[in-house]
Structures are given as C-alpha cells and as structure tokens.
Amino acid sequence: MLKLLFPLLFLFSLFYRLFVELKNFLFQHQIFLKSTKLNCLLISVGNITAGGTGKTPIVMFLARKLQDKEREVVVIARGYKKKGSGFLVSNRKEILMEPREAGDEATLLAENLKGIPILVGRDRKRLAKIALNNFKVDTIILDDSFHCRYLEKDLEIVVIDSTCPFSNKKLLPAGLLREPLFSLKRADCFWLNNVNLVDEERLNDLKKFLAKINPKTNIIESFYEPISLADSSGKEIELSTISGKEVYLLAGIGNTLPFEHLVKNLGTRIKGKSYFPDHYWYKEKDLKRILQEEFEILLTTEKDLVRLKDIPFSKSILALRIQVKVKNEERLWENLKIIK
C-alpha cells in the first residue's frame, strides 16, 4: 500500500520543499521575513527530522547546567498536541497548567526544571518577549525551534539521532525530513544522540557526512543513562526494584530503541510491549487490553507517564527516569562558547 502511495507522497514533498526553500530564502535575504535580535542569550535546540531525536532530555540537561552556572533561564516549548490556549506552564514556583493543556513535553519540563519558568506555544517570538518582560531572564532556551527563524539565535543546536539520522533522506510526507539537508549549514552545533547504540564505523561515517555539509560546526556526542524510577505520584524508586522482575513495556515516543536498550540492561525480563505514536494520549481501553498479558510491572517513560496518570490501572506503573551523559563534557562549554 505504501509503495502505491509513494509517488503521491513524493509529489507532496516537492511542494513542501518549495515552500520551505522559499521561506528560508526570504529570511536569508530579509525580504518580508526578518529575524529579531533579543537582549539575552538565545539557544535553540531543534532537529531536522520529525520527532524522535531526544531533544527534551537535552533541553533539561542544558537548562540545569546553565542554572548551575547562575544563568537566569527560561525554557519555551512548542507544546505539540496541547489542548489549552494558555502559555505559562510554570512560573518558577508552581505548575499552572494541566498536562493536556500544556502538552506532555512542556509538562515534563516543568516537573523536572524547578525554579525555571516554562512557557509553551507556537509563537516563540511573542513568548520570548513575554519572558523578558515578566521574568528576570538572561538566557532563553527554545525547544524544537530549528525551523523558527523569527528570532536571531546565538546558538543553533541540531539534535541528530545516531541510530536513524535522516530516515530515507526525503522530505515530509515522503520521508521524515522537515527541511532539505543543506539547511544544516545554519547549525552551530551537531548534537549526536544515542551514540552508544551504533558502531564506531557508522558513527564516523555520520560525522564525515555532516562535515561535508558544515565543516566548521562543533559535534557533541551523548547517550542516556538510567538514574531512577518514578511512580505516578512522582515518588522516586531505586532502579534495583525492577531487577529480575517481569515487565511490560509501554511507550508512545519517537524512538523506542534507547528505552528498550536501557530496560534490558537493568536485568528485567521483558514479557511484552506496546508502542504507540509519539505524543499519543492513552485511553482506558488501551490499558485494559494490556492487562490481559502476564507481567508484574508496567514500565514506561517519563513523558508517557504524564499521559497515564489519570487512567486507572490495577498493576504497578513505573517510569524509567533518565539523564543525558555527554562525552567530554568539559569541552562542551568551551567549544560552544556560550558562557561569557
């Protein structure tokens, strides 16, 4: 079926490419469309593909590190599939929006970044100005904003999943690319994620490919490591709790490979798994179907737990909490040169 539809999808991708290239041309030459410079450090964390690269944990990593360096940070997220019209998810002290209103990623950011305001919405230019006017801010991190060109960025980070960098190298809807690959020339940093899941030869080939497109751009390498478990109330639980246990995996994320890899290495016995599209809002019938399986613990991701909290379930639901580990982290800040 997909083969029959591909010519049509390819045709649509050509029209999409024309639109993207026209927009980028107008921004590049400041014709009708112009980028605004803000009076703060503006860091963009984005990707060139549609989802699944792991931007949110990287945003959390950067926000915490910058906070530790005594920067006054605000994070602005896009809020994909959010239902509400509000924009202030967290005001440093408390979370002000329900998960469905804010979206799962913005809620996850608010739960993990204490003391950092979280704003959400498509109009990042407007939200950045609101942040500057209402909070003591010297640093703004934009989540999912490689394609947002209405703001002049001080640092453009493009996150690339090393396990599947560019899909079939075709633009939406024929592939996963949101822009042509030559758009990577705008990047200041290529952040290669999940480098532990590919062999050295494949990783080096990816680096060489990126160097041909943009030879001056820094390359950062990272992977995930598990830090703890969390229940639906947010209580932290030791990783050893699930060692030797029969678990069932449930996830609605862009790339389930890192999640499954981490779970296997924790000494669990995976009895089954159900994977859904990214940002999928679970229904009670989804969990009822899973209850027909034999297992002890339903194991999911932190982002998925946001979308599971209000659904009744008779077995234990735990989320695997992870953190980003950067290779040669001491070089990160020096190479990126974002801290004066």
Image (cartoon, rainbow, N blue to C red):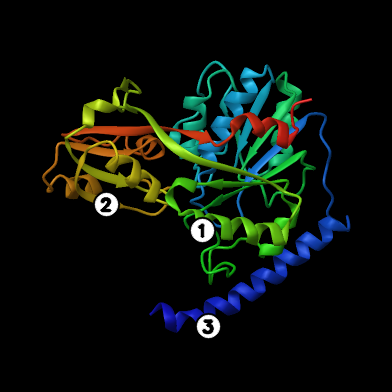
> Residue at (27%, 38%) from the top-left corner?
299
Residue located beneath label 1 in the image: 201
Residue 76: quarter of image? top right
Category of crowding for the residue at label 1, using alpha-carbon neighbours closer than 10 angstroms: few (below 14), some (14–19), many (at least 20): few
Q: Residue furthest front?
A: 201
Residue located beneath label 2 in the image: 274
Amino acid under label 2? Ser
Category of crowding for the residue at label 2, using alpha-carbon neighbours closer than 10 angstroms: few (below 14), some (14–19), many (at least 20): few
Quadrant including the N terminus = bottom left
Residue 212: % across, % down: 71, 62
Residue located beneath label 3 in the image: 7
Amino acid under label 3? Pro
Label located before the other in sequence (2 or 3): 3
* Secondary element at tag 1: helix
Quadrant including the C terminus = top right
* Secondary element at tag 3: helix
In the displayed structure, 265 sits above or below 168; it is: above
- Disc 1 to disc 3, how far (Cα)? 33 Å
- Disc 2 to disc 1, how far (Cα)? 32 Å
In this picture, residue 273 sits left or right of residue 118? left
Residue 139: % across, % down: 72, 27
- Disc 2 to disc 3, how far (Cα)? 31 Å
> Residue at (29%, 23%) from the top-left corner?
238
Q: For the residues carrying marks 2 and 1, which lies nearer the camera in this image?
A: 1
Label located before the other in sequence (2 or 1): 1
* Secondary element at tag 2: strand
Amino acid under label 1? Glu
Q: Is residue 103 visible?
A: no
Q: Nearer the viewer, residue 207 or 40?
A: 207
What is the count of numbered marks? 3
